[in-house]
């Protein structure tokens, strides 16, 4: 009789511990899921998860960068981020062979917003887990259009300044309150 009570007690204890562990795991998993969603929401760049070039998750910044509601891109091919089929295929040729070897890759590539406006994106991709084919990749799109425009203006300005300085070496001015050519 005592043996049966002990067996029943151990069985109940095992079941309770199992439930507690399951509940703890569920709470831990839910907290981890909330943490991941918070991290994705905090990123100001579009972040999408891809498997076979099909989007299976997208953060809220997809709307800011591309003009698409994140829910509207899930289940679609990334083709909608590129000007043409050729551009879509070119980005695949640039990224996938490198990702199979190095697991991460970054490159700049022209993209298109939902409204048809062209943007230049810095695209950063990383393989999920060890095998790209098994789990897919995570891709971040950073709109660097304004950055590149500013960079181009600075380079033009620098070039203009250098030409001015190089050509002005024969002119010498003396400043004493008035500008006049030396005698």
Image (cartoon, rainbow, N blue to C red):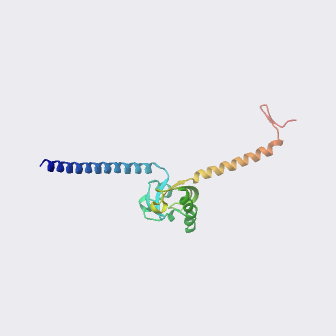
User: Is residue 109 left or right of 6 when viewed as pictured?
Assistant: right
Q: Quadrant of residue 76?
A: bottom left
Q: Nearer the viewer, residue 88 or 26?
A: 26
Q: Quadrant of residue 168?
A: top right
Q: Position of residue 25 (x, y in %)?
A: 32, 50
Residue at far top of view: 176
Instruction: Please name the residue shown 69% across and 50% down the image.
Output: 156
Q: Position of residue 148 (x, y in %)?
A: 61, 52
Instruction: Please name the residue shown 35% across and 48% down the image.
Output: 31
Instruction: Please name the residue shown 57% across and 68% down the image.
Output: 86
Inspect this view and state whether residue 117 appears: no
Instruction: Please name the residue shown 82% across and 38% down the image.
Output: 172
On screen, residue 120 above or below 76? above
Q: Position of residue 39 (x, y in %)?
A: 43, 49
User: Is residue 63 left or right of 83 when viewed as pictured?
Assistant: left
Residue at far right of view: 183
């Amino acid at each position: 009789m005592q043996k049966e009570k002990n067996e029943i007690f151990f069985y109940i204890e095992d079941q309770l511990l199992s439930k507690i562990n399951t509940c703890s795991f569920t709470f831990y998993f839910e907290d981890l899921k909330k943490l991941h969603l918070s991290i994705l929401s905090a990123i100001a760049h579009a972040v999408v998860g891809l498997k076979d070039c099909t989007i299976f998750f997208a953060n809220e910044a997809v709307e800011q960068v591309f003009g698409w509601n994140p829910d509207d891109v899930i289940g679609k091919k990334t083709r909608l981020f590129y000007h043409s089929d050729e551009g879509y295929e070119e980005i695949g040729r640039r990224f996938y062979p490198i990702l199979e070897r190095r697991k991460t890759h970054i490159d700049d590539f022209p993209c298109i917003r939902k409204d048809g406006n062209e943007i230049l994106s810095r695209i950063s991709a990383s393989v999920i887990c060890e095998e790209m084919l098994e789990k897919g990749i995570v891709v971040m799109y950073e709109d660097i259009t304004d950055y590149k425009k500013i960079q181009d203006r600075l380079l033009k300005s620098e070039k203009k300044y250098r030409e001015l300085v190089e050509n002005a070496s024969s002119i010498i001015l003396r400043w004493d309150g008035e500008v006049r050519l030396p005698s």
